[in-house]
Image: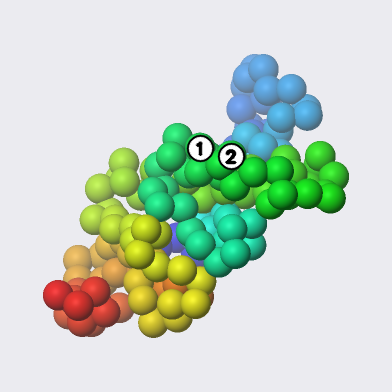
Amino acid sequence: MLNKAETPDGEALVDKAVAMGADIPPENRSLVARMLSLGEEDLIGGLKTFAELSAGRYPHRLDAESAIKETDGLGADAIAGVSEQVKKQKLQDIFFATAYYDKLVREKKDVAYYGDAVSATDAGKVLIRWKTERDKYRVVFGDLTAKDVTADELKKLEGR
């Protein structure tokens, strides 16, 4: 798992790219910087946002297409009374959670996601997990707390 100190500095990467001639409009630079420095906090933040909008549920699937479609299905009531800027931020938070999930999948981190069976009230249940090293996993539980566990501990947590 990359902690904040090990996560690439997206802003520095964007600045370097612009200096080398990349055409990244100023209004898009913070968004690009965030994409370049995705981490666990983006995953948890997006899951938290979805749970807040859906009375404690998580997306059934965490691929971008499914999660965004499910977010759209929550309806206007879920985001009623908030500014367009706040709506945009919430949707971006959910999108960035899916982007980090996709990154873990592409990196073949032995990812498993249980959003179809775990809700925000399931403190002891594994919501998502991924391999961080040979016999170690990072686990995020239904209450969005996170913990490093061994492969044997993970088997017990997942009831295997």
Residue at 40% x, 68% y: name it: 118
Q: Which residue is mark 2?
A: 72
Residue at 71% x, 43% y: name it: 76
Q: Is residue 138 left or right of residue 143?
A: left
Check whether the beta carbons of the residues at disc 2 and disc 1 lie within 8 A of each other. yes
Of the residues shown, which amino acid type is indicated by label 2?
Asp
Residue at 53% x, 39% y: name it: 68
Q: Quadrant of the C terminus?
A: bottom left
- Image height check: is 37 above or below 151? above
Q: Quadrant of the N terminus?
A: bottom left
In percent of width and height, residue 9 lies at: 60, 48
Q: Which residue is mark 1?
A: 69
- Quick one: SS at disc 1? helix
For disc 2, the neighbor class at 10 Å (few under 14, some 14 to 19, many from 20) is few
In percent of width and height, residue 137 lies at: 29, 69
In percent of width and height, residue 123 lies at: 45, 80
Q: Could you say which quadrant of the image residue 35 lies in?
A: top right
